[in-house]
Image (cartoon, rainbow, N blue to C red):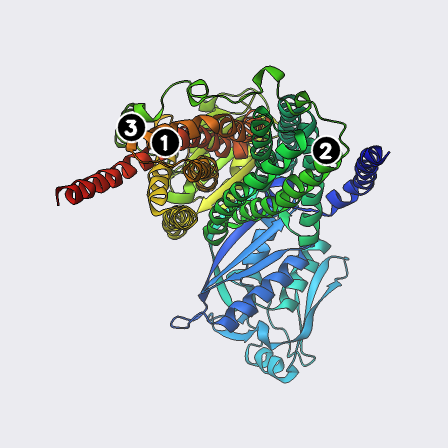
């Protein structure tokens, strides 16, 4: 009876948790903020320049300008704008879900300096002379809107009108003349009017700008990213579909390979997804396109913890252990390996967070969060649920755990080893060296196709939505931006419905408006664009940050491995990491794929993930060395070879689940994360190869010197 109570407890826990998730998931998902690349909008990084030459940008000036920008954004009716200060002299503005991007950009960047100028062009009064909230909207006799200005010092305005009686006094907003009336009489009431407003909305906006005051500093756009609302919705729909596909295939794989434990892993994977959504909602985090890609990627990474444990359980079952005994041994021996792999990936993600752009920071935040959550769900949670069923003593047969009866029994090393990997290490060195040489030749001959993130300019992605010829698009671009050089227009997308090009120099928003207007006239209103503009100063900074990020991640992971294992293991990791960074770089050069910030994010993710696989192998080598006393180098080679084959399935399967999710993103996801997924695919293949055929072999080669030294010392002792 007691054993059935455990099964009932398991069923009740799963049903109650499932009911709770179904009841609350919709509400939680609606509370998660979507980034501008998913709901449309724009992000601009401004640099402040003081109004007067010689002035410095101070903390107070930054704060005042940020407050003024926030007020202006509120005038535009934007909900939850993000205005953040980036020292020493920059302000980043992110507005998601906006449809009037051009209007808002004008509104934010307008200095709004109101001046009254006499016929000699001298400024006789300024906007600062207005009374608090001194601008209001009124109507003339024909019911046309106008702006009424009330001054704080009525006498001062009276003196101005007296000194300019029967003369023109023009009213300017920045360098634009709004009106140029003749002073017919001395005005003593301290009021003036601005006429010529085309609509009531225009008049109200001007009133609000004048009442909020002039910007205390000039704003120079250094970096711009914009996405149309319809393109954001399309990107969200496609990437979510990719997630469903990847999730479904991973569930089937786990169930097929591991049977009962696989079912437990699938249940906890659903819990994992729910808890991640819950944490995102609690964090009030903004989910970007790369963030969703990272979330999908984490599904494959989460079940890696299960695979490492379940493979160990299967190994114990094959050695005649009972299911419960195999479970206890498997979970104990696999935990430290799982923890090490999580720590190395978190190190890479922390570096991304420190040096990445806002969207990349969102990706790294989600990656760290999902890794931590997976420890509770797919490690502790899955083990607890599996223990409930095992202790019921109903599921004893090895078949329940994916182990066939014919596979049970102690296997000799010779039976386990398919071929000697270690003795063939020189062949793998030659292969890797050949790849590196070919990659260097490719980079020397073809160069790297560097995106605007690293070389400045404007990348323009145009959604045409129907059949088109690249030459037609190029004609439009030549007409609208005649003096700017751009690369040939390239088609892409599942139906070649997208066109992309890169301008060598940044183009302005007026030119962008003209391009979109012309394309809509030619192809219809479904045409939409997304733009990424980077100033040369920002491009240089990004190149430096990317290099520092890759170096710091590699050094941090190597130090951790050296501390956790052995110094020589750390050196082997450095060689493998350099291999894993270089191979995707060489392939991107060969196929002339664009390298941008998402490529760097993919590389750092691979740096962390590749080490996970290497840790599994190193951990088994260390365990076998504790159990077997190695006296000669030949014995060491044999031990490493056996260790590699003992962990071969684990190495392949942990990569395979991540590969499944990445392939889903590449095949079905948004075009915005296509190159990101390609870099991950190249890196996963390279990382798996390097973990098995390079990292362990380099360690063996380094250990060979130790054995030679020991042998020489022993011979000297004998000679004495």
Query: Sequence order check: which comes first, mark 3 or mark 1?
Result: 3
Quadrant that contains the N terminus: top right
**In the foreground, 61 or 676:** 676
Query: Sequence order check: which comes first, mark 2 or mark 1?
Result: 2
- The Cα atoms of the two marked residues, 3 and 1, are separated by 14 Å
- The Cα atoms of the two marked residues, 2 and 1, are separated by 45 Å
**In the foreground, 677 or 193:** 677
**In the foreground, 613 or 475:** 613
Q: From the image, tell me which residue sits under label 2.
A: 390
The answer to whether residue 459 is left or right of residue 94 is left
- Residue at the (50%, 73%) spot, across then down: 123
The answer to whether residue 485 is left or right of residue 303 is left
Spot the residue most to the right: 1
For the residues carrying marks 2 and 1, which lies nearer the camera in this image?
A: 2
Q: Position of residue 515 (x, y in %)?
A: 51, 36
- The Cα atoms of the two marked residues, 3 and 2, are separated by 46 Å
Q: Position of residue 642 (x, y in %)?
A: 42, 27
Q: Position of residue 503 (x, y in %)?
A: 41, 38
């Amino acid at each position: 009876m007691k054993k059935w109570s455990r099964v009932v407890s398991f069923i009740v826990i799963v049903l109650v948790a499932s009911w709770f998730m179904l009841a609350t998931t919709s509400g939680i998902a609606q509370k998660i903020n979507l980034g501008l690349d998913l709901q449309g909008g724009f992000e601009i990084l401004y640099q402040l320049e003081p109004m007067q030459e010689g002035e410095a940008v101070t903390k107070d000036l930054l704060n005042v300008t940020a407050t003024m920008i926030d007020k202006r954004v509120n005038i535009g009716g934007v909900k939850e704008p993000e205005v953040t200060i980036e020292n020493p002299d920059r302000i980043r503005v992110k507005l998601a879900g906006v449809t009037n991007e051009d209007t808002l950009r004008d509104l934010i960047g307008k200095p709004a300096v109101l001046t009254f100028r006499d016929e000699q062009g001298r400024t006789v009064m300024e906007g600062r002379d207005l009374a608090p909230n001194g601008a209001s909207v009124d109507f003339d006799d024909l019911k046309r809107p106008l702006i009424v200005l009330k001054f704080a010092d009525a006498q001062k305005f009276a003196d101005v009108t007296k000194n300019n009686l029967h003369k023109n006094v023009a009213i300017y907003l920045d360098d634009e003349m709004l009106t140029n009336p003749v002073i017919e009489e001395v005005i003593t009431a301290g009021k003036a009017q601005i006429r010529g407003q085309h609509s009531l909305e225009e008049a109200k906006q001007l009133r609000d700008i004048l009442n909020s005051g002039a910007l205390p500093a000039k704003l120079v756009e250094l970096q711009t990213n914009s996405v149309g609302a319809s393109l954001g919705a399309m990107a969200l729909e496609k990437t979510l579909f990719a997630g469903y596909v990847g999730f479904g295939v991973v569930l089937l794989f786990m169930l097929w390979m591991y049977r009962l434990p696989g079912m437990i892993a699938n249940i906890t994977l659903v819990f994992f997804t729910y808890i991640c959504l819950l944490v995102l909602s609690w964090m009030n985090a903004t989910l970007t396109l790369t963030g969703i890609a990272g979330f999908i990627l984490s599904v494959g990474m989460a079940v890696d913890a299960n695979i490492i444990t379940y493979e160990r359980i299967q190994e114990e079952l094959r050695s005649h252990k009972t299911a419960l005994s195999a479970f206890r041994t498997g979970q104990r021996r696999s935990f430290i390996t799982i923890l090490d792999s999580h720590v190395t990936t978190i190190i890479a993600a922390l570096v991304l967070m420190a040096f990445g752009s806002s969207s990349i920071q969102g990706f790294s935040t989600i990656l760290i969060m999902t890794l931590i959550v997976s420890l509770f769900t797919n490690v502790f949670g899955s083990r607890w649920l599996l223990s409930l069923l095992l202790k019921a003593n109903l599921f004893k047969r090895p078949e329940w755990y994916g182990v066939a009866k014919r596979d049970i029994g102690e296997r000799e090393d010779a039976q386990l080893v398919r071929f000697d990997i270690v003795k063939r290490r020189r062949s793998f060195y030659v292969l890797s060296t050949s790849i590196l040489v070919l990659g260097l030749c490719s980079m020397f001959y073809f160069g790297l196709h560097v995106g605007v993130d690293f070389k400045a300019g404007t990348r323009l992605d145009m959604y045409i939505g129907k059949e088109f010829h690249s030459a037609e698009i190029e004609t439009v671009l030549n007409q609208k931006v005649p003096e700017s050089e751009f690369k040939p227009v390239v088609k892409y997308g599942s139906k070649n419905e997208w066109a992309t090009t890169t301008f060598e120099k940044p183009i302005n928003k007026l030119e962008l408006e003209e391009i979109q207007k012309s394309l809509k006239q030619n192809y219809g209103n479904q045409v939409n664009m997304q733009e990424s503009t980077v100033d040369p100063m920002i491009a240089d900074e990004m190149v430096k940050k990317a290099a520092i990020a890759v170096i710091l991640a590699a050094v941090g992971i190597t130090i951790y491995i050296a501390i956790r294992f052995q110094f020589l293991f750390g050196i082997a990791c450095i060689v493998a990491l350099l291999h894993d960074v270089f191979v995707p770089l060489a392939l991107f050069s060969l196929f002339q794929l664009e390298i941008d910030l998402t490529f760097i994010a993919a590389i750092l993710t691979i740096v962390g993930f590749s080490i996970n696989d290497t840790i599994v192998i190193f951990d088994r080598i260390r365990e076998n060395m504790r159990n077997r006393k190695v006296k000669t180098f030949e014995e060491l080679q044999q031990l490493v070879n056996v260790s590699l084959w003992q962990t071969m399935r684990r190495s392949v399967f942990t990569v395979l689940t991540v590969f499944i999710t990445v392939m889903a993103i590449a095949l079905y996801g948004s075009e915005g994360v296509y190159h990101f997924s390609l870099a991950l695919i190249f890196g996963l293949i390279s990382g798996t190869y390097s973990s098995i055929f390079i990292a362990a072999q380099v360690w063996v080669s380094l250990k060979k010197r130790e054995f030679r030294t020991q042998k020489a010392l022993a011979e000297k002792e004998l000679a004495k």
